[in-house]
Image (tube, helix red, strand yellow):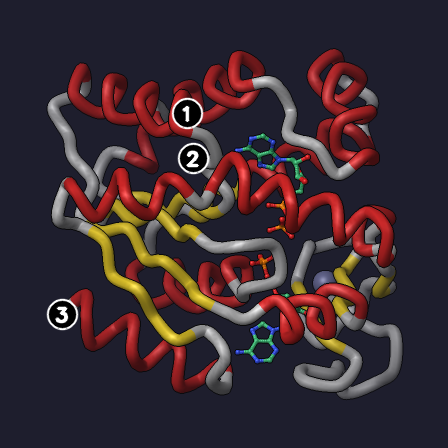
């Protein structure tokens, strides 16, 4: 299973991604998670990416394409993977196609998680993330059992800096301009499935699974 999760910020890619990788036992490759970890650890990549992430802009293609290529070449990705938040530009999509071709692979499906802007704003501003394991919650729609504490590892929950209202607006605009064209790109390849992401988490997951089977 080689899956790409496409959709605007807040659509539920990370949430569905967690469920899908558990079911299919494939690695979860989230460029957002990789970049946030690099920024936290102040690696060279992190130092380069920081300004873009903070402004709600995309990190340059060259930087992300390199990371993803390396990640997909690792042994645990040989029999499948789930890409979350990549590709995000036509250039990234073309680079992905090219490197999969080189490895003699192709994508199984691209799942487009479709959600209206109003709901996205509510989801992003209420999102909380675990500092230790990266698990995602929502103060209203998917709250942890104990306030501010991760159910999975006991870590502290925090609000991502780029989930502040002003940055969210910028990220949604970046999505419309730079990422949305990928819907047509994958439709043309006949591998696109659009799921109604405004439904409850379990229903969105059920729809995706039904399609993949
Ligand atoms: P993305 O990775 O696409 O940015 P997330 O998976 O982080 O999105 O979800 C954004 C926020 O919305 C999180 O707080 C998450 O808990 C919540 N969420 C995700 N899916 C749903 C859903 N189907 N219904 C309600 N809230 C959801
Ligand atoms: P969300 O799903 O909520 O938009 P992500 O965690 O996927 O958030 O991404 C957070 C930030 O990381 C983006 O706003 C962008 O700055 C950077 N980023 C993540 N993935 C990519 C990518 N494929 N290309 C460029 N920048 C990226
Ligand atoms: Zn945790």
Q: Front-most of 123 and 41?
A: 123
Residue hosting label 2:
87
First along the sequence among labels 3 and 1: 1
* Element at label 1: helix
The structure residue drawn at horizontal position 48% and vertical position 36%, both measured from the top left corner, is 88
Q: Does ligand 2 reach within 8 Å of label 1's beta carbon?
A: yes
The image quadrant where one finds the C terminus is bottom left
- Mark 2–mark 3 Cα distance, whole angstroms, equals 23 Å
Q: Image check: 39 left or right of 176?
A: right
Residue hosting label 1:
92
The structure residue drawn at horizontal position 43% and vertical position 35%, both measured from the top left corner, is 87
Q: Front-most of 16 and 74?
A: 16
Q: Are marks 2 and 3 in contact (CB under 8 Å)?
A: no
* Element at label 2: loop
Q: Does ligand 2 reach within 8 Å of label 2's beta carbon?
A: yes
The structure residue drawn at horizontal position 70% and vertical position 32%, both measured from the top left corner, is 57
Q: Find ligand 1 in the image and state its quadrant.
A: bottom right
Q: Position of residue 47 (x, y in %)?
A: 80, 17
Q: Position of residue 65 (x, y in %)?
A: 46, 20
Q: Does ligand 1 reach within 8 Å of label 3's beta carbon?
A: no
* Element at label 3: loop
């Amino acid at each position: 299973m080689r899956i790409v999760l496409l959709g605007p910020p807040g659509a539920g890619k990370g949430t569905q991604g967690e469920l899908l990788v558990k079911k299919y036992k494939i690695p979860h490759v989230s460029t957002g998670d990789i970049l946030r970890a690099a920024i936290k650890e102040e690696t060279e990549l992190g130092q380069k990416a920081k300004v873009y992430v903070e402004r709600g802009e995309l990190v340059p293609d060259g930087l992300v394409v390199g990371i993803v290529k390396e990640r997909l070449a690792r042994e645990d990705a040989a029999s499948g993977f789930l890409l979350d938040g990549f590709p995000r530009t036509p250039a990234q999509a073309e680079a992905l196609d090219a490197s999969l071709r080189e490895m003699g692979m192709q994508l199984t499906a691209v799942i487009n998680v479709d959600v209206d802007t109003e709901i996205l704003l509510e989801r992003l501003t209420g999102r909380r993330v675990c500092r230790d394991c990266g698990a995602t919650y929502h103060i209203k729609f998917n709250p942890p059992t104990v306030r501010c504490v991760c159910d999975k590892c006991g870590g502290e929950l925090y609000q991502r800096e780029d989930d502040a209202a002003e940055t969210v607006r910028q990220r949604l605009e970046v999505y419309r301009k730079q990422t949305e064209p990928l819907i047509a790109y994958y439709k043309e390849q006949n591998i696109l499935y659009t799921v109604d992401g405004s439904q409850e988490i379990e229903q969105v997951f059920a729809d995706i699974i039904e399609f993949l089977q």
